[in-house]
Image (tube, rainbow, N blue to C red):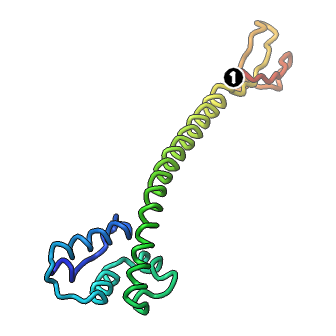
Amino acid sequence: MEEINNIQQEPDENLYQVWERFKELLMKCHQHYLTEMQEVILFYNGLGIPTRQILNSKGAIPLKTIADAKIAIHKMAKYSQKWNNGTSESRSTETSSGLADIQAQVNNLGREIKKVNEKFYAAQIRYEQCKGPHYTKDYPLKEEGKALEEAYYT
């Protein structure tokens, strides 16, 4: 009886799951002496706020007749079961494909960085005496007989 009176929706439970759990508790305790309206109110009060809002979308449950309240809970629980089955799978798939997309972008970025690192800018001069390339930092450019040449290596 205590479990019935203190029913609470678990964070990972959808409306269908908590409704089925509540009905099982009622079946286990045949002599709970609750009216149908008390059952509905106990169940309703044990739901999380988002679930209550969904359940109330076609009118506040506490203001409905007992028959209408039970029909509304039953219908929304059935829909909840369908939504969560589809949503869970699609979220999982979206997450997996999202991670794959991010990984591909990281890999592409890594390749681009590698290309940039492979390219380097070198300012070279030809020295008249040896005709070899020399870095400008090693020789002043204003000396006679030297020419500046820029090269990109890939």
Camera-side residue: 59 or 130?
A: 59
For the residue marked with disc 1, what is the amino acid? Asp
Camera-side residue of 76 and 30: 30
From this viewpoint, which residue is outermost toward the top?
130
The reply, left or right, for residue 74 in relation to residue 108 is: left
Residue 105 placement (x, y as % from top left): 59, 40
Residue 99 location (% of width, % of height):
51, 44
Residue 145, visible in the rendered structure: yes
Q: Is residue 91 left or right of residue 77?
A: right
Report x, y in % for residue 133. 74, 14
**Which quadrant holds the C terminus?**
top right
Within the image, what quadrant is residue 7 found in? Answer: bottom left
Q: Which residue is drawn at 38% across and 67% down?
A: 14
Residue 152, image quadrant: top right
Label 1 packing within 10 angstroms: few (<14), some (14-19), many (20+):
few
- Left or right: where does residue 84 sit relative to residue 44? right
Viewport quadrant of the N terminus: bottom left
Residue 84 to residue 135: above or below: below
Disc 1 designates what residue? 138
Residue at the image point whose x is 20% and y is 73% from the top: 27
In the picture provided, is 25 more to the left or to the right than 113? left
Label 1 element class: helix
Res 70 → quadrant: bottom left
Q: In this view, does 83 lie above or below 48?
A: above
Q: Residue at the spot x=63%, y=29% of the render?
A: 117
